[in-house]
Image: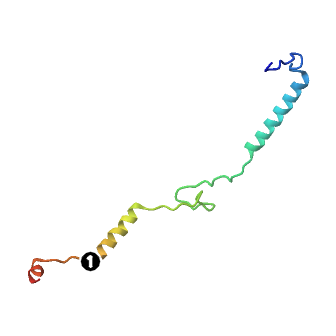
Amino acid sequence: MLSASVDPASSRFTRSDAGRLLAASAVLVLAMSVILGLDILPAQATLVVDKPASTNVVAPRAVEYTSVVLTERQRAAARAAVGFQYDFTVAKGAAR
């Protein structure tokens, strides 16, 4: 036989099984209540418009932000600062 049959008398749910189930459920509920009830992160400061912040306001992580507007302004200023390289005119071309 490939599978062994289980004795139905040994697989019944008894009173001691109910007690263990109840105890395990209580431990699980208590553990989840403690874990979810912990206040690990401090509460966020309430910010009001036109009033100084009561605590330091910090970013959640360090991120580098590239501004498209400021980048384009810098590029335009750099373009304007460079003089013309090719100053060909008809008079200069005729002189050669």
Q: Residue 39 placed where, x, y %?
A: 72, 49
Q: Quick one: which residue is furthest to the top in this view? A: 8
- Colouring convention used in this rendered image of the protein: rainbow
| Image quarter in which the C terminus is found | bottom left
Pointer 1: residues within 10 angstroms few (<14), some, or many (20+)?
A: few
Q: Residue at x 63, y 53 (%)?
A: 44
**Three-letter amino acid code at disc 1?**
Gly
Q: Residue 9 placed where, x, y %?
A: 89, 16
Quadrant of the image occupied by residue 30: top right
Quadrant of the image occupied by residue 34: top right
Q: Residue 65 placed where, x, y %?
A: 48, 61
Q: Residue 32 placed where, x, y %?
A: 76, 39
Q: Is residue 18 above or below residue 49?
A: above
Q: Nearer the viewer, residue 80 or 49?
A: 80
| Image quarter in which the N terminus is found | top right
Q: Residue at x 16, y 77 (%)?
A: 88
Q: Residue at x 19, y 78 (%)?
A: 87
Q: Would you say 82 lies left or right of 18 here?
A: left
Q: Is residue 90 above or below residue 56?
A: below
Report the residue marked by disc 1: 83
Q: Nearer the viewer, residue 14 or 26?
A: 14
Q: Residue at x 54, y 60 (%)?
A: 63
Under tag 1, what secondary structure? loop
Q: Nearer the viewer, residue 81 or 60?
A: 81
Quadrant of the image occupied by residue 89: bottom left
